[in-house]
Amino acid sequence: MRESDYAALAQFRYQIRSFLAFSEAAARRQGLTPQQHQALLGIKGFVHPQHATVGDIARFLLIRHHSAVELLNRMAKLGLISKFADPEDARRVHLKLTGKGEQKLRALSRKNIEELRRAASPALSRLFKSFRHSGGA
């Protein structure tokens, strides 16, 4: 690897951390924890014929199942999500955003996309171009 590869990787990590800090602060301004924001995004963005389950969100957030249960219970109490039993397997709980959850996620997603367009896109384009020209390890 070249020195410029290390510099590019360092810059890439910085861009990721800067975006995450922006996104976390935006979530807090909306009255959400960063983890609640990520859970809303995971539920809304789940691509499967059925709704996301507690297990799906635990995997998405890289947390244990019981931690996801606690998080999602708090979110349901806040009116951000609704939970309903799977009609074929009552042990499985499906998740859906409420109107309030949809509104908060929409507002945060717009802000995050704006921030990505403003700050990250040009920098990331340069970084990926640098990686392509480096030839790898």
Image: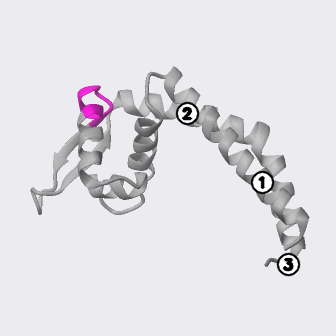
Residues shaded magenta: 74-81
- The residue wearing badge 3 is 135
Label 1 with label 2: CB-CB less than 8 Å: no
Does the magenta segment cover residue 40? no
Q: Position of residue 129 (x, y in %)?
A: 86, 64
- The residue wearing badge 1 is 10
**Mark positioned earlier in the residue sequence (1 or 3):** 1
Q: Position of residue 54 (x, y in %)?
A: 27, 52
Amino acid on which the number 1 mark rests in the picture:
Ala
Q: Position of residue 113 (x, y in %)?
A: 65, 39
What secondary structure is found at the residue carrying circle 2? helix
Q: Which is in the foreground here, disc 1 or disc 3?
A: 1
Relative to 41, 96 lies left or right: left
What secondary structure is found at the residue carrying circle 3? loop
**Crowd class of label 1 (few under 14; some 14 to 19; many from 20; radius 10 Å):** few
Residue 24 tag number: 2
- Residue at image x 70%, y 36%? 115
Q: How many marks?
A: 3
Quick one: 113 or 28, which is closer to the camera? 28
Image: 118 above or below 135: above
